Image (tube, helix red, strand yellow):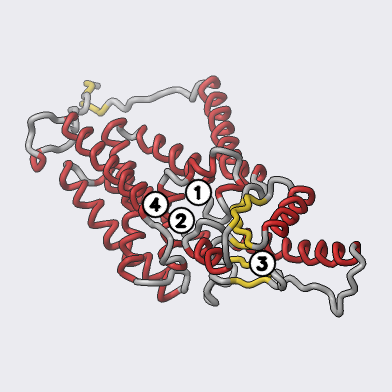
Amino acid sequence: MSAHTIPTSGPTPIGRILGLIVGLSAAVALILLAFSWPAVTSEPKNLPVAISGEAAQVERARTALDENAPGVLDLVEVGSEDEARARIEDRSVYGAILLSSQPEVIASSAASPVAAQMLTGLAGRLQEMANQAAAAQGIVLPEPIVVPVTDVVPLADSDPRGAGLASATFPLLIGGILGGIAISLTVVGVWRQIGAVLGYVVVAGVVIAAILQPWLGVLHGDFLVNSAAVGLALLAIAAPFLGFTAVFGRAGIGVGVILFVLIANPIASAAAPPQFLPEPWGAVGAWFPPGAAATLLRNLSYFPAADVGFPLAVLATWAVIGLLLVAAGLFRASPGRPDEDRAEKVEVREPVLKAS
C-alpha cells in the first residue's frame, strides 16, 4: 500500500510576521507621502503672466504686486493686448494684466482653473489698489474703477470646472499599467508581446477617446488625433512595464509602480500649474508619461497654437525605451532561439511515493 507524501510546514515564524507588518506599514506610509506631498507643499508662485501698458504703469504694478503678493507672479512684459492673447493661446503664460485707460485682466480657465481663479482674485485686488491710489491723489472719480476679467480660452460647458480633463490622466496611467502587466504575464515571445501591446494601445486608445470625447465631452478637437494621443500615452506606460518585467522579472512590476505611480503621477501637474510645486519637481514631472499626457491632451483640446512637440517626444521616448527593454530582456533570456519556439520551461516532478 502506498500513499502520496504531503509536505507540511509549521506556523509562520514570528519574525517573518513582524517583518511583514513593518514592510506593509512602510509601504502605506510611502503611498500616503507620495500622494499627499504635492497637495501639502503646492503653493501659488512664479505663475507666468503677461503685462502690458506704459512703462510707468507697468513699474507701479510690479511694485504693488511685489509688496502685496511677493513671488506669486512671474510678469512677462508684452507690447499689446494682441501679443498677450497670443502668449496665452500658445501657453507661454496663463493670463495677462492690461494697464490702459480701462484696466483688464485676461485669464484662461482651460489652461488652469486654479490659475484663472487666482487671476480673478487679482483683478479685485488691482481694482481696490486703483481706487485707493486715485483717492490718495485727490482724484474724484465719477464712478469707482472696475477691473473686468475676460476668459479668452474657457473650458467647455460639458466640463465647466475642468475636473474631467484633470482626472483623465490617472485612468490612462492605470490602463497602461494593467496592459503592461497582463501582457507580460500571459504572452510569451518578444514579437508577440510587442504586437500585443501595440494592438492593445490602438484599441484602448479609440475606446478611451470615445468615452472622453463624444460621451463625456472632456476632450475636444479631432477624434482620431485624440485617439492617437491616448494610445501613445498608454504605450509610454505599458511598454516600460513590459520592459521592466523582461529585464527584472516580476520584480519589474514593482519598479514600474514606484516609478510611475509613486514618483511620476504626483508631480504630473494635471490639476494645477507645475510652477506651484516645489522646484524642480514641476519641471521634472513634464519628463514622465503622466505629465506629458496631461499637457498633450489639454493642448490638443483647447490650444491648437501651442507646441505639442515636447510632450510627444517624451511619450515616444518612453515607449521606445520600453520596447527596447522588452527585446533586450527576452532575447537575452533565450539567446539564439527563434521567437516562435521560445516558451517558459516548467519543471515537472513526479510525486514522491512512500510505502506504507
> Where does label 2 land, which residue?
294
Q: Nearer the viewer, mark 4 or mark 3?
A: 3
Q: CA distance from mark 4 to mark 1?
A: 12 Å
Mark 3 neighbour density, 10 Å: few (under 14) some (14–19) many (20 or more): many
Q: Which residue has dot 4 on it? A: 311
| Residue 121 seen in the figure | yes
Task: Give the CA distance from mark 4 to mark 3.
Answer: 29 Å
Q: CA distance from mark 2 to mark 4?
A: 9 Å
State whether residue 147 is above or below residue 245.
Answer: below
Instruction: Name the side, left or right, on which 235 lies relative to 34.
Output: left
Counting residues from the start of the chain, the first of labels 4 and 3 encountered is 3
Viewer-closest of 143 and 37: 143
* Distance from Cα at disc 1 to Cα at disc 3: 28 Å
Local secondary structure at mark 3? strand
Q: Earlier in the sequence, mark 1 or mark 3?
A: 3
Residue 256: percent from the left, percent from the top?
Answer: 39, 39
**Residue at (34, 60) in percent of width and height:** 229
